[in-house]
Amino acid sequence: MKHKGKISGLLLGNTVAVTEWIALQDVITKLDSRSFYTVFIIYILQMILSYYFGHWYDKKASEQVDMEVGGMASNDFVVDFFKKVAALTERDSHNITVYILSVKEWKELKETVQEKKMESTIVKTIRKGDVVTRWDENKYVIVAIDNGHEKSTITNRLMKNIESEIENGLLSMTLLFGAASYPIEGKAFEELLRKAQNQLYQNRNL
């Protein structure tokens, strides 16, 4: 259920409020109008908090479902994923690579069937343990556990699969990549993303 968290949160909040009302009924009935207004404000705040935490639960649940069905993750999910796997990979010899992908002919691709095809192809091409998100309008960020981008085949696979899929739709396109690996080129996600973007911009100007 899409709004399970919000519904459960409001039900729980109301249950707590009703329980408090019953327990303190004798006290509440003797309150003056000003004190009663204060109690009412507290009730409203309880409902707002219940809705907020319910909304947070729904958001996290939705992100998890998206990942399970192989969809695009949210930006926040990808950042959190990087932090978790970074802590784990410190114990072994693997790297984590932040890849960034952009399309030079984005204006021709935007809001077309080909755009949807490209997103679907990206999701299908990356490995099951990797995650991808749409970072900006014309950029996709992939976080992959590998042996570093210099040894990885992911960019070649993406180029081959995307160009094959899109060019079948009679649209020629140029894919631009940038990449930076943890821990060799940086340890923070933001630092690696910045280096990957700089590499992408350099490739764009070639």
Image (spheres, rainbow, N blue to C red):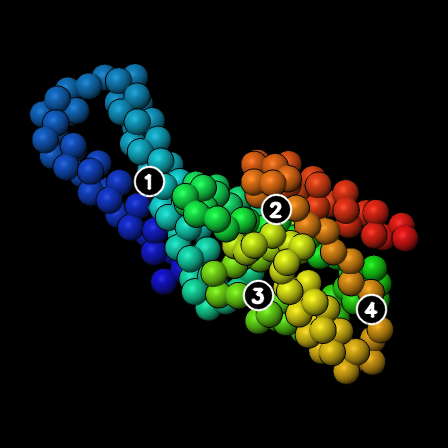
Instruction: Please give the residue where the numbered disc 3 appears in the rendered image.
Output: 126
Q: Are marks 1 and 3 in contact (CB under 8 Å)?
A: no
| Mark linked to residue 50 | 1
Q: Are marks 1 and 4 in contact (CB under 8 Å)?
A: no
At label 4, the amino acid type is Met
Q: Secondary structure at mark 3?
A: loop
Residue 134 x %, y %: 63, 55
Residue 24 x %, y %: 12, 27
Q: Secondary structure at mark 2?
A: strand
Residue 17 x %, y %: 21, 36
What whole-number distance in Å separates the C-alpha atoms at marks 2 and 4?
Answer: 26 Å
Asked if residue 30 can be seen in this view, the reply is yes
Q: Residue at x 84, y 73 (%)?
A: 172
Residue 84 sits above or below residue 30 on the image? below
Residue 79 sits above or below residue 118 on the image? above
Asked if residue 190 can be seen in this view, the reply is no
- Frontmost of labels 2 and 4 is 2
In this picture, residue 158 sits left or right of residue 170 = left
- Frontmost of labels 3 and 4 is 3
In this picture, residue 176 sits left or right of residue 129 = right
Q: Residue at x 61, y 37 (%)?
A: 186
Which sits earlier in the primary sequence, circle 2 or circle 4? 4
Crowdedness near tag 2: few (<14), some (14–19) or many (≥20) residues, C-alpha within 10 Å? many
At label 3, the amino acid type is Ile
